[in-house]
Image (cartoon, coloured by chain):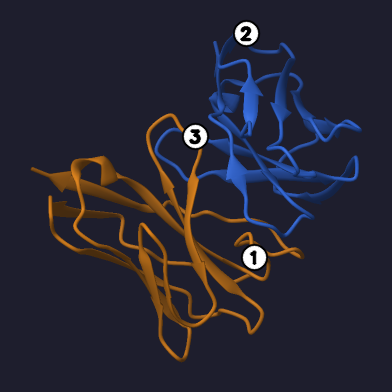
Chain colours: A orange, B blue
Amino acid sequence: LAKTTQPISMDSYEGQEVNITCSHNNIATNDYITWYQQFPSQGPRFIIQGYKTKVTNEVASLFIPADRKSSTLSLPRVSLSDTAVYYCLVGDGPGGYSSASKIIFGSGTRLSIRP
Amino acid sequence: DAGVTQSPTHLIKTRGQQVTLRCSPKSGHDTVSWYQQALGQGPQFIFQYYEEEERQRGNFPDRFSGHQFPNYSSELNVNALLLGDSALYLCASSLKRLGEQYFGPGTRLTVT
């Protein structure tokens, strides 16, 4: 199972672009990369998922270099409501976890947005 | 279209007691996974149910057990509660085990 490493915390200001990088050196060929967002006392919410290159949706972009050993979640023009914990998961299922191993979220990155 | 629902929202139990938590998956989903999230930590996978059977299990003792019903809803049972079982218990549903997971709001369990 590919282990992920993320910064423990990040700070930014409203209107800025925020990039959170996740390292997954042992990613396997069949692994997808998935990011979740979690607000206090709520369940995680799916943000974006990708396999290679770049994926963009209405809330974020995900950049994955050719070697796939890392990925970067990009949040454009953040607002105070983007303050949350962000988790990077790697696994061979499109749900972001491995069908043959344990599902590991890690401790995530605590993002704080200031006015 | 109802999302994942969990009950109860909050629960207070005493050490040694037993507790049952309930989860209804998102409409159209057939797989339910349970997670335990201690304060300040990421969710830890407990187990996953699909076709009424436990398919995967994380590193949790046998005190943690579950069940999935024919309508895909699920229960998490914890016996002989310990203080360390105090946590937010999250249920997530997906389609065919490997689909995108949708999480419920969780049940906050406090063991005193």
Give the residue type that dot 3 points to. Answer: Ala
Image: A89 above or below B94? below
Residue A83 appears in the figure: no
Left or right of B59: which side holds B89?
A: left
From this viewpoint, which residue is outermost toward the bottom? A66
Left or right of B87: which side holds A100?
A: right
The residue tagged 3 is: B38
Label 3 with label 1: CB-CB less than 8 Å: no
Q: Residue at x 17, y 47 (%)?
A: A113
Q: Residue at x 61, y 34 (%)?
A: B3
> Looking at the image, which is closer to me, B17 or A88?
A88
Residue at mark 2: chain: B
The residue tagged 1 is: A94
Question: How far across and how far down the image is residue B94, in percent?
Answer: 70, 49
Quadrant of residue A21 within the rendered picture: bottom left
Residue mark closest to the camera, 2 vs 1: 1
- Few, some or many residues within 10 Å of mark 2 (<14, 14–19, 20+): some
Give the residue type that dot 2 points to. Answer: Thr
Question: How far across and how far down the image is residue B20, in percent?
Answer: 74, 18
The residue tagged 2 is: B14
Q: Secondary structure at mark 1?
A: loop
Q: CA distance from mark 2 to mark 1?
A: 39 Å
Label 2 with label 1: CB-CB less than 8 Å: no
> Looking at the image, which is closer to me, B78 or B95?
B95
Q: Residue at x 79, y 55 (%)?
A: B96
Image quadrant where one finds the C terminus of chain B: top right
Q: Secondary structure at mark 3?
A: loop
From this viewpoint, which residue is outermost toward the front? B1
Question: How far across and how far down the image is residue A16, in percent?
Answer: 14, 59
Residues at marks 2 and 1 on the same chain: no
Residue mark closest to the camera, 2 vs 3: 3
Residue A7 appears in the figure: yes
